[in-house]
Amino acid sequence: RKEVEQDPGPFNVPEGATVAFNCTYSNSASQSFFWYRQDCRKEPKLLMSVYSSGNEDGRFTAQLNRASQYISLLIRDSKLSDSATYLCVVNKEGFQKLVFGTGTRLLVSP
Amino acid sequence: DVKVTQSSRYLVKRTGEKVFLECVQDMDHENMFWYRQDPGLGLRLIYFSYDVKMKEKGDIPEGYSVSREKKERFSLILESASTNQTSMYLCASGGGTANTGELFFGEGSRLTVL
């Protein structure tokens, strides 16, 4: 079983739609959680951290459910520029050693 | 603007050749990492370093070695390249604690081994 699992997609949505991605992780000792964004043929970049209480950054909302070991990302009012692959990332050890999911691809169309 | 620079964007090598991939960061970060990214497998950690001259194996270190002689530079070495090492190689650096997830990545080096 993979340490971090995501639906690869693609998720095809029209502009303005709301879309949600989930991610599950296998190690209950995981300490911290993140979403990264990777544009086509580009390097990954941090989108946002995920906190136990849930957190929001503009149109993006991230939530963590430790009991069920899943993380979610909600994107409201999707823009064309949101088209990218979203990587779920987990830090399982007391060091900056991150485990990346394989990513969920989002395509936003006009 | 913070930057992680990888020396080569594209390389083509032959089986058995020695390959050096260089990475330099200008953020004075302690931690540096080498990942490879393959379709369907995502990013997998090869080696990392949390200090000069220190190195730790990641999840897939076989066939690779690294060197960190200076804080800003982390090199990945393929002693004898093989076709299954054809991949996108991503270097990253980070200066935070365990709970700081921000790694800064270079643009990647796409290696093809013939």
Image (tube, helix red, strand yellow):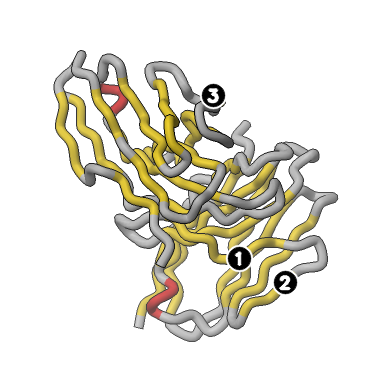
Mark 3 touches mark 2? (CB < 8 Å) = no
Mark 3 touches mark 1? (CB < 8 Å) = no
Mark 2 touches mark 1? (CB < 8 Å) = yes
Which residue position holds label 2? Answer: A55
Identify which residue is drawn at 47% across, 40% down: B71
Residue A5: where, in percent of width, then height?
59, 44
Identify which residue is drawn at 23% across, 46% down: B9
Sequence-first disc among 2 and 1: 1
| B47 with respect to B113 (left or right) | right
From this view, report whether residue A18 is shown above or below residue A99: below
| Disc 1: host chain | A
> Looking at the image, which is closer to me, A106 or B86?
B86
Identify which residue is drawn at 30% across, 16% down: B79
What secondary structure is marked by label 3? strand
Q: Is residue B14 visible?
A: yes
Quadrant of the image occupied by residue B22: top left
At label 3, the amino acid type is Lys
At label 2, the amino acid type is Asn
Residue B52: where, in percent of width, then height?
52, 33
For marks 3 and 1, give the CA distance.
Answer: 27 Å
> Looking at the image, which is closer to me, B77 or A48?
B77
Q: Which quarter of the rendered picture does the N terminus of chain A lie within? A: top right
Which residue position holds label 3? Answer: B57
Residue B59: where, in percent of width, then height?
54, 27
